[in-house]
Amino acid sequence: MALIEKTDNIVTGYDLIDNDHDEFIILLNQLDSASNADSPALFQQLYEHTEQHFDRENKLMSQFAFPAEAEHKVEHQRVLGEFKQFKTRVDKGLITFGRSFVKERLPQWFQLHVLTMDSALVAHIKTQQQA
């Protein structure tokens, strides 16, 4: 069973963000079912994707003068900080720590983040595009 299923409640309606979210979900689910031998490379891939994904969102927030930009960026930095801590452990061969982060932390965080912060960003972008 997948950690996250793509459902309507995690679709924002903004293709650039939704495409990043789709890739995040695919990588997260692949990592959850990966062998210990494949886990470090997939963890690295998910980490790099997340960095790029956040960078694209950060640029959108600046481009559209998103009022909650500072809070949203702080959340991105916090999650990347957690990711780096677990990546260090995975890189040392402590795969169980990475698996725990992927299974117990990322799915819940991701769904809440999409439903709150990312949805608010998309609503703001759509308002700005209509103005």
Image: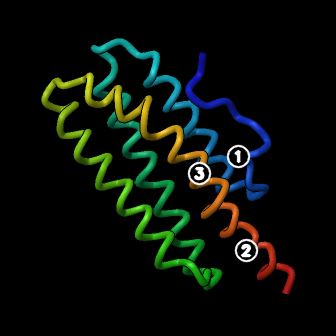
Q: Could you tell me which quadrant the C terminus lies in? A: bottom right
Left or right of 94? Residue 7 is right
Q: Nearer the viewer, mark 3 or mark 2?
A: 3
Against 21, residue 2 (above or below) is above
Image marks 3 and 1: residues in contact by CB distance under 8 Å: no
Q: Residues within 10 Å of mark 3 (few under 14, many from 20)?
A: some
Q: Amino acid at mark 3?
A: Leu
The span from disc 2 to disc 1 (Cα, nearest Å) is: 17 Å
Q: Amino acid at mark 2?
A: Ile
Left or right of 127? Residue 63 is left
Say which residue appears at 28% left-offset and 27% top-offset. Answer: 40
Against 21, residue 92 (above or below) is above
Q: Which residue is mark 2?
A: 125
Q: Which residue is mark 3?
A: 112
Against 68, residue 2 (above or below) is above
Left or right of 97? Residue 12 is right
Q: Nearer the viewer, mark 3 or mark 1?
A: 3
| Spot occupied by residue 19 in the image (x, y as percentages of width and height) | 66, 47
